[in-house]
Image (cartoon, rainbow, N blue to C red):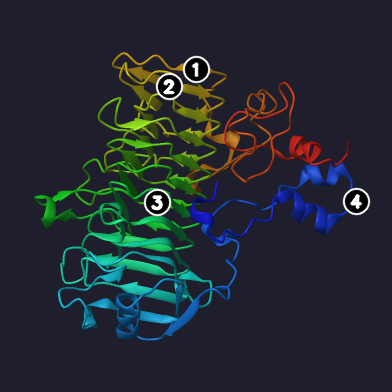
Amino acid sequence: MNPGGFPVAVPTTCGSRIAAACGGVLLAILAAVRPACARLPRDAPALPPPDASYTVVPVSTAQQLADACWNLASNQAIVIAPGTYDLASVNFPNGVDGRLTVGRYGASPIRHIQIRGATGNPADVVLVGAGMTDPLVPFGFQIFTASDVVIADLSVHDVYYHDVAVQGDQGAHQVHLYHLRLYDAGEQLVKGVPAADDVSVEYSELFFTAGAVDHPAVGNTCYTNAVDGVTVARWIVRDNLIHGIRCQDLTLAGPAILLWQGSSDSLVERNTIIDSSRGIALGLTGSTDHLRGIVRNNFVHWDANANYAVDVPIYTTSPNAELLNNTALTAGRYPNAIEVRYSGATGVQVINNLLDAAIQPRDGAAPTLSNNLTAAPPGWFVDPAAGDLHLTALAGAAIGHATALADASDDFDAQSRPPGTNRSDIGADQTLPDWIFADGFGG
């Protein structure tokens, strides 16, 4: 899926890397060595430069950046030079506050916009606000009347509300957030409001350095998520590293990824979520809160020694949702690894998940459960504390005990799962030997 036709580079798979590097190396050698192919922000394929259809606007100061955003027109690409951009120091063109506006509020719509760090490294271009509780800089980017927008290769932190807000109520849609570092916002890091459809969040790191604050805008309570989409359709959240989504006051934070209030057809895949209060939620408060959607091939791990409140890693209230081939470990912090809630959540499929805790239907839900393991020990995984839930040789009960599903035909590393009965693995990781056979190495 590629909403809006954005220029998404196709990643190099582990298979093609090995084939290129090793050629005819013996299958036994290949099977003995696990390549480093984790789908994390550091592995983001570079986006191509803006093509000839874009007018490039280079900027190198915070004031230039604010002015360029305010004056954006269709088919423009703002390219930001390396540096730290202090948004609190800017005389903002809107005359009100320190937000970078993409498509002016109430103005005619604009299309085909890119805003990008110049080097491809998000650590090189850092946009900083006045702090999580200082309203001087309420947002990083706030997208109003713009569509076909790419924001890539930069960092945003220490703003009052959201690092990126997509205002669907003003016509913002088809937004691609790629290879970003978004952290330490007063509320959610990425926020989408009704009709902010066809948004993708990919290869980004989303986190709090010390937890979310009790925020004055919501009665001095902790109100946060990494990604929060409200009444949105067709969001894609994948290949992200999400961590520290928790509250400084140790109360329960919201789900790291929350798509709800009438959202639909979400795809959440290949994310690593660690050291947070809650994981992935399609819907939250009722069975009309989300419709359909797929959650597949995610790594989720809780900190066994954390002192903050913890809840379930994967949760849905969504009719016809599919929870497929995820690996989720509670580390003893919570009794359930997956919950399906409410009698209206009909047609939910929970298949081939590798867990260390129960799958719990609640409040009349009756999901279809098939081929899940719910007592996986830590030794089955490479480095659970770091969120590396690739399988070790000890995970024999998970290896080669699944049949690849049509809606989960690859794994956490985007490696193809081998076809055939009991040739695929349970959980998000497909181990190397079967994957080599699937790529044609060794017959």
Q: Earlier in the sequence, mark 3 or mark 4?
A: 4
The answer to the question of whether label 3 and label 4 lie on touching residues, with beta carbons closer than 8 A, is: no
The answer to the question of whether label 1 and label 2 lie on touching residues, with beta carbons closer than 8 A, is: yes
Q: Residues within 10 Å of mark 2 (few under 14, many from 20)?
A: many
Residue under pointer 1: 369
Question: Which label is found at residue 24?
Answer: 4
Question: Which label is found at residue 243?
Answer: 3
Q: CA distance from mark 2 to mark 3?
A: 23 Å
- Amino acid type at mark 2: Ile
Report helix, strand or loop for mark 4: loop
- Amino acid type at mark 1: Leu
| Rendered position, 262 above or below 344 | below
- Tag nearer the camera, 1 or 4: 1
Q: Residue at x 26, y 52 (%)?
A: 169
The answer to the question of whether label 1 and label 4 lie on touching residues, with beta carbons closer than 8 A, is: no
| Rendered position, 128 above or below 335 | below
Give percent across and percent down for residue 148: 44, 60
Nearer the observer, 23 or 114: 114
Question: Which label is found at residue 359?
Answer: 2
Quadrant in the rendering for residue 443: top right
Image position of 87 (left or right of 389):
left
Q: CA distance from mark 3 to mark 4?
A: 40 Å
Question: Which label is found at residue 46?
Answer: none
- Amino acid type at mark 3: His
Image position of 352 (left or right of 276):
right
Give percent across and percent down for residue 130: 21, 72
Q: Residue at x 37, y 80 (%)?
A: 84
The answer to the question of whether label 4 and label 2 lie on touching residues, with beta carbons closer than 8 A, is: no
Q: Earlier in the sequence, mark 3 or mark 1?
A: 3
- Tag nearer the camera, 3 or 1: 1
